[in-house]
Amino acid sequence: MSKVVVVTSGKGGVGKTTSTASIGAALAKSGKRVCVVDFDVGLRNLDLVMGAERRVVYDLINVAQGDAKLPQALIRDKRIETLSLLAASQTRDKDALTEQGVEKVIGELRGMFDWVLCDSPAGIERGALLAMRFADEAVVVTNPEVSSVRDSDRIIGLLDSKTLRAEQGLRMDKQLLLTRFDAGRASRGEMLSVADVLDILSIPLLGIIPESEDILRASNLGAPITMNGSTSLAGRAYEDASRRLMGETIPMVIPGEKKSFLNRILGRRAA
Amino acid sequence: MNLLNFFKPRGTAPVARERLQILLAHERITLGPRNLIAILRDEILATIAKHVEIAPEALTVKMGQAGSVSTLEIDVEIPTEKVSAKPAHQEATLAKAAAASR
């Protein structure tokens, strides 16, 4: 049974593309057939983060419009056999993507993959709505920061009203992926805590990804952090999140939250 | 360092949290009933599940609008126990609760 997941956030720059690539690679590593789809028409980047930027021949719009067959457009990852990418188009015409076109492509992908991850563009415009339209569930990527939390709240509202599932009166499952989290700052009361964000958005937590230098290193190299057996906290957090997405129960740890005794006491006070 | 922190004013996160709570409470009203349907759906499902085994897919909740009233349509398919001859489903269109639309 195939699952279509939209990775969305409202706000830009919070880590949608990084998260799509990292979760996609982690799922594929466990043997699942995975396709990551870039919906950011005009500003594609998933190809770059996946290290496949020089292999893009056909893209999502070509397939949606029938100019290319899906197998021609799919880029198979060279490192993980079961991982594929469908790139976004560089065209400036955002209206080139239609609902019918997307429906057709998603339908075909469902027949070929266990997991289809749709990397949504930022904003709440057409592209973002099309990315979520045919999804079975959503991963809402949020930074512990006021503007990101506000935009996530908007996106949750749209997931509950503008998706096909919502219109059919069915449940749209949404899970929160808290990225760029700094446990130290949160414990000192300088950053919204995990509990704060969960309390405000009231959707279940998929994972907490710590702020990490390794993320930049991974995108520099075009190798998602979950790909090369990295032992970094962020990589492990993405792996845990991916396993939770597959339905496993894995205890939630707040990465990097190891404090000295004194810091702990003072941290609690501030939080 | 930690002792110095002790005397500083407390962090700004509580302010952020409070501002967000106030703002979002307001925006959720003006921008439409956020995930009201989803919340209703989950709670109705939980309530039914306390008494009857029910698949999440067996419940649909829709909100519609007709003139100045909003309608809420809740449709539940409850499988009859194997005691009865036919596994027919009981349609329980529970409510068309009318509420004044905002």
Image (cartoon, coloured by chain):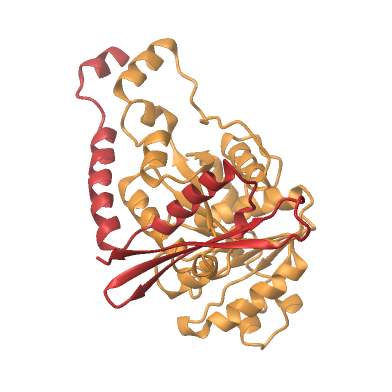
Instruction: Please state the total of marks drawn on the protein image.
Output: 0
Q: Residue at x 41, y 27 (%)?
A: A184
Q: Residue at x 51, y 56 (%)?
A: A16
Find the residue positioned furthest to the front: B84
Where residue A17 appears, x then y in whole percent?
54, 58
- Quarter of the image for residue A192 reads top left
**Chain orange in the figure, letter:** A
- Identify whether A194 is placed above or below A260: below
Q: Which image quarter holds the C terminus of chain A? A: top left
Q: Which image quarter holds the N terminus of chain A? A: bottom right
Does the image show residue B1?
no
Where residue A172 appears, x then y in whole percent?
53, 58
- Identify whether A16 is placed above or below A58: above
- Identify whether A184 is placed above or below A209: above
Where residue B25 appears, x then y in whole percent?
26, 50
**Chain red in the figure, letter:** B
Q: Nearer the viewer, residue A45 or A3?
A: A3
Where residue A228 appears, x then y in whole percent?
71, 44
Does the image show residue A104?
yes
Q: Is A236 left or right of A33, judged from the image as shown?
A: left
Q: Residue at x 69, y 71 (%)?
A: A55
Q: Nearer the viewer, residue A98 or A210?
A: A98
Q: Nearer the viewer, residue A7 or B80?
A: B80
Q: Residue at x 31, y 19 (%)?
A: A269
Q: Is A136 left or right of A146, judged from the image as shown?
A: right
